[in-house]
Amino acid sequence: MPDRERWNATWRELGVASPPDQVFDELVARYSEAHRAYHTLRHLDECFAHLAEVRPRCTYPAEVELAIWFHDAVYDPRSSQHEELSAQWAERVVTAADGSKEAARRMGELVMATRRLARDAILCHESCEERFGHQRSLGGPPNGETKCCDDQCNDCESENSHQR
């Protein structure tokens, strides 16, 4: 489970003081909301595990990690503005913690990128489903299978029979 120690270490890596404890508490509360099925604390852990694999290649790893923390912090099942509201919140928190405007902007862009990635994954999945007749639920590769169509699709079979 994401913890305060990790949260504070990431802010130190960014070179600014951690925001007030209420921000961490509110993030944890939001990712624990009963109506969430996917964007939960477990999902954050999965994202952090993936980040550990790619972190050495990140130009701004602390910003990437904080964008993960915020990427769907605001989630209302009746709205389509999750990422916009989450990005705005992230930018406000970074700015209030005396982070640079550039870091706040990049984090906001990273949060917004999750919207495009999700859309692209859905489109890729729908295309694969249509072309190859298999169905999977979005949310990660089934049974440890790997990606098929492109870097966004985690959903399809991995037998390379339909690699682009």
Image (cartoon, helix red, strand yellow):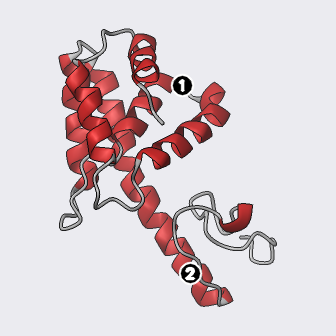
The answer to whether residue 50 is seen in the rendering is: yes
**Label 1 is placed on what type of residue?**
Thr
- Specify few, some or many for label 2: CA neighbours under 10 Å numbering under 14, 14-19, or 20 or more: few
Q: CA distance from mark 2 to mark 1?
A: 33 Å
| 25 vs 75: above or below | above
Most foreground residue, 40 or 71 = 40
Q: Position of residue 36 (x, y in %)?
A: 33, 59
Q: Residue under label 1, please give it.
A: 59
Q: Residue at x 57, y 29 (%)?
A: 58
Q: Which mark is residue 127?
A: 2
**Quarter that holds the C terminus:** bottom right
Q: Nearer the viewer, residue 10 or 88?
A: 10
Q: What's the residue at 56%, 81% (across, down)?
A: 127
Q: Please state which of residues 34 and 164 is positioned toward the viewer in this rendering.
A: 34
How far across and how far down the image is residue 59, in percent? 54, 25
User: From the viewer's perspective, is 94 left or right of 50?
Assistant: left
- Is residue 66 toward the left or the right of residue 27 in the image? right
Q: Is residue 162 above or below residue 52?
A: below
Residue 63 location, x and y as percent? 42, 27
Q: Is residue 60 visible?
A: no
Tell me the amino acid under the disc marked 2.
Answer: Ser
Relative image position of residue 110 (x, y in whole percent)? 39, 40
